[in-house]
Amino acid sequence: MSHCIIDAAAVPTGNGPHPAASPYDKRISESLGLTTFEVCQIELPPGAETVRHNHLDDRSEDMYAILTFIAVCSA
């Protein structure tokens, strides 16, 4: 088994094939050489949203990991 280290900051952003693809997506899987599943890093700026979607047609599943979250509350 081998490993690969990439700098996610160096991966370009842009819409991918995912139904909820956005201009904030970084297709990490391509940089890692993965072909059996897709890995995307999505960095949403404040106020941005992703597209609501489902995978009834392609029977794929999504997995999300929130790495950084900053909430701002105002009165």
Image (tube, grey):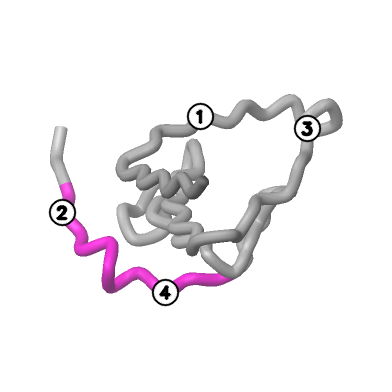
Q: Is residue 64 magenta?
A: no
**Mark 3 = which residue?**
54
Pick the front one: 57 or 22: 22
**Mark 1 = which residue?**
63
Q: Secondary structure at mark 4?
A: loop
Q: Which of marks 3 and 4 precedes in the sequence?
A: 4
Type of amino acid under label 1: Met
Q: CA distance from mark 1 to mark 3?
A: 13 Å
Image quarter (top left, top right, bottom left or bottom right) of the N terminus: top left
* Residues at circles 4 and 1 in contact by the CB criterion of under 8 Å: no
Write down the region rendered in magenta: 4-14
For the point 50% across and 44% down, which residue is it? 38
Q: Hey, which quadrant is residue 11 in on the image?
A: bottom left
Q: CA distance from mark 2 to mark 3?
A: 31 Å
Instruction: Report crowding for label 2: few under 14, some 14 to 19, many 20 or more residues within 10 A (C-alpha).
Output: few
Which numbered tag is attached to residue 12?
A: 4
Q: Which of marks 1 and 4 precedes in the sequence?
A: 4
